[in-house]
Image: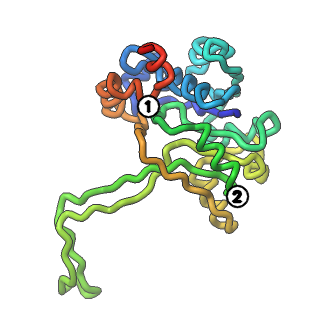
Amino acid sequence: MHAVILAGGKGTRLRPYTTCVPKPLVPIGDTYSILEIVLYQLRSRGFTSITLAIGHMGHLIRAFVGDGSRYDLRVDYTDELMPLGTIGPVLNLLDRLPEHFLIMNGDVLTNLDYGAFLTRHVRGSAPVTVATYRREIRSEFGVLDVDDAGQSIVAFREKPSVPFHVSMGVYAMTRETLRRYTPGQVLGFDTLMLDLLASGERPGSDLFGGYWLDIGRPEDYDTANEQWNDMAPVLLPHMYQSAAD
């Protein structure tokens, strides 16, 4: 099984932590970098080869990970000379990739079983399957429904919550889905979703209810560090169980 990890962003929202270090290499709990956690997780779930899509400070990532042998993985690289969006870097790799593979952001902390997720995609018929997570927004105010004239209140809800689903930044992809695009072009996840829906092809949703934290802001990074002692055995059970034994 193969995964493409997107690790080329500038991490501007996470500054000042990313001033001198690319976001995938920022440490969690003074133990492992985000990228190391992801690599160990992928290996434990049956993945054997990884492509790292690097750009900003990519030389540091390349020097840190090397050929992947210390993670028992085969790691190669693709250099992003200009920002190509979430999916764009993968277009240059299609001939090197298997029929089905994983694409994921390099700043995600989750205990999602990546191997089982990819297997469910392969067994289905969706052109791409998105790992999704349930969120909700709770209003700080009572919400009024007003008639078209704006003169009468027709309903009232006290501080309602609105549930919705978000992408976790983890995608199971079928290679042929991307053949319609030109290598080198900018292609975001949003454009891919809209193109598929417009053509009548429905992307799959794989709803996950475990732990997920997208480390995009300083407060997210602080949360990851605060939770590390409790979450380390959840995120890396094979490693912490071995240590306990």
- Where residue 67 sits, quadrant-wise, is top right
Residue 109 placed where, x, y %?
Answer: 45, 33
In this view, 100 is above or below 33: below
65 on left or right of 75: left
- Which residue is disc 1 drawn over? 12
Q: Mark 2–mark 1 contact, CB under 8 Å?
A: no
Residue 229 placed where, x, y %?
Answer: 33, 22
The residue lying at 59 percent from left, 44 percent from top is: 117
- Where residue 150 sits, quadrant-wise, is bottom left
150 on left or right of 43: left
Q: Amino acid at mark 2?
A: Ser
In this view, 157 is above or below 20: below
Q: Nearer the viewer, residue 172 or 219?
A: 172
The residue lying at 42 percent from left, 39 percent from top is: 212
- Which residue is disc 2 drawn over? 125
Q: Is residue 55 visible?
A: no
Mark closest to the chain's N terminus, 2 or 1: 1
